[in-house]
Image (tube, grey):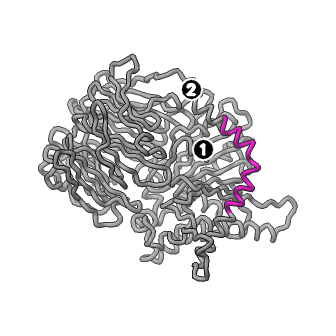
Amino acid sequence: QEGTKIPSQRKQNKSTPTSELLYKNLLKSEQENWNGISARYEAMTERIKAKLEELHNKYTFNLRSPRIRFGDNVYFEENGCIFLSKADDDEGNVEPLFSAEDLGFSDAFIQRIRISPDQRHMAISLKSENTEEATCVVMKLGHFPVMEKVIPNVFNFEWATNDVLYYTSQKNLKCQNVFMTTFTNQKHTKLVYTEQDARFFVDIYCTKDRRFLTINSNSKTTSEVWLVDCRYPFKLPTLVQARTKGVIYHVEHRNNELYILTTYGEPAEYKLMKAPVASSGMENWQLVYALEEKTKLVDLEMFSDHSVLFLKNAGHLYLNVISFVSHSVQSMKLPTWACEFELESHPEHTTSTCYFQLTSPVHPPKRFAYSFKENNLIEQAVQEVPITTDCHTTRLLAKSKDETLVPITVFHNTNSKELHRKPLLVHVYGAYGIDLNMSFKEEKLMLIEEGWILAYCHVRGGGELGLSWHKDGCQHNKLKGLYDLKACIMLLHELGFSQPKYTALAAASAGGVLAGALCNTEPELIRAVVLRAPFLDVLNVMMNTHLPLTIEEQEEWGNPLADERCMKYIKSYCPYQNIKPQRYPSVLITAYESDQRIPLAGILQYVQKLRKAALDHASRTRKEGNWIPNIILDIQANGSHCDSSWEDALSE
């Protein structure tokens, strides 16, 4: 990180480290290169920008922001402001409670809102584009809301009572301390919990019935939960079950029983179990419901008499509704076009309806309601928006090197003829047990309208088929994700979806490992690669324990410092380590100067090495029609690793 400081001209002297000067010169030459290249695309950029704004205004601009309902009061956010309205008010009367701009947070967006049980206080987290740490602002509500406290570097927070707030602090991407602060006459703040193990990250959650706050300490494979009884918020937290290597668990509460979502027992997939609050140890956990094989649990919502499980199986979404009264499970299939859930806040656990939204890369979010009484699903038409019906969704299975079947979701225009001549954009991620992002994006719909084919490859390492799907693609199984990606692209071409010379590959963050590895091993399968904040030098990052995430990440990539076999294995697939003189596809990388997760220095080195290899190959094989790929790096001065606002995403 020291190497990223750019010294001023005046201070440049003989003592300036060579690496710092080298970094500065590389950065400058890449920015000049980008300015020269991007100028050629101005006309195309303007056309695309206008088209995306048109789609945004047509489909998502009018979508309601999530509502938080407390009795008759409804809280919602719009354009950096928070408003209060009445549930039955058809007149559209709203009362402004908060404006980020008015309070001097003009460059920040609202990330999280928590209302105290008596609705006299509101805690808001504000985050700017250039940092991952958020600021918590606490407002005292009333006729004239006033800002009562500002807490910097906060990850998340929950109200334990009307005037006691618990929050976690974040530093260098780590979250290890929990604090309690009071808004009574005697205001004080104290440290409640500290996590000592660098592999663990701490957050807090409030159970749906508001009986407990849970302090959750999670590594990539193991977790531990402590309870704060909201009736006695000053008492010390109590332990549910001591951390056991390889066991993940999360806690909800109902009728003096803890409902525990856990990987404990065989198979190591999620199960819903329960135990009495007074004897919550693992030996007392009783099975309530086990997931089917190859099923991904997206989320669980707890209500007074029901629990709703949001599930994914082979790309299809469905709900399982558990009734605690009749001890039955109802399964509800959802529309076949849906690829992603967007869950809504339900502060009142006694409600008889569960609301959520369904979306896909090319379908704007649609709101649905599930009624426990009627046992049916109702589509909520908020406004009349013509939905794109001329987009076809296909689900395929590709056979990988070890015969494992890998799901692919494909979208294309129903009216497209000669699909083998159409351009194809392939998406991949395959890490941390996280699914490929398949929520709506205006640019995906634009590509469909312009005749493109979109393919999403759900390779191992991701979470699409449950926890075992992730386990089968991490540490010493990383190459399986690469074999899966190759099999997916080959199947798409075999079935007549485009061909190598019209195929592009898109990946972000850790998805860059598989995309970069494919460029080295199978460059003839693709013509272009688009990478955003990509992870490309696994070996050097995992050897550098001074970086903020290296220790925490060992459960995903292994520890090359302690294990020579692991070191050799990482070296075998690491994109940076395996660049060689050959014909590469063209590459566009977007990186961020202030990215805390992916050091820019590593990306600069990757680009230099890749360009040299491509030029070496071209000079050795001076054949007729030989082409040198475009290798372009766009370094954004603003923005960070995580999702940005619509305006920033548009300009990027």
Q: Quadrant of residue 144?
A: top left
| Location of mark 1 (residue) | 455
Q: Residue at x 34, y 33 (%)?
A: 68
Task: Kindly give the residue lying farthest to the left in the view shown.
Answer: 278
- The answer to whether residue 640 is left or right of residue 636 is left
Which of the 4 image quarters holds residue 622?
bottom right
Residue for point 32% across, 59% down: 222
Q: Which residue is mark 2?
A: 387
**Residue 467: % across, % down:** 40, 52
Visible residue check, residue 281: no
Q: Is residue 45 magenta?
A: yes
Does 206 appear in magenta? no
- In the figure, is residue 175 to the left or right of 186? right
Foreground residue among 628 and 132: 132
For mark 1, give the secondary structure: strand
**Closer to the camera in the image, 497 or 40:** 40
Mark 1 vs mark 2: which is more N-terminal? 2
Main SS class of the magenta portion in the image: helix
The Cα atoms of the two marked residues, 1 and 2, are separated by: 20 Å
Depth order, front residue of 475/346: 346
The residue at the far bottom in this view is 14
Query: Residue at left 67%, top 60%?
Result: 31
Viewer-nearest of discs 1 and 2: 2
Amino acid type indicated by mark 1:
Ala
The secondary structure type at the circle numbered 2 is loop
Q: Residue placed farthest to the top in the image? A: 91
Q: Is residue 597 above or below residue 562?
A: above
Outermost residue toward the front in this view? 10
Categorize mark 1 by other alpha carbons within 10 Å: few (<14), some (14-19), many (20+).
Answer: many
Q: Can you say whether 624 is above or below 325 in the image?
A: below
The kind of residue tagged 2 is Ile
Q: Which residues are magenta?
A: 30-50
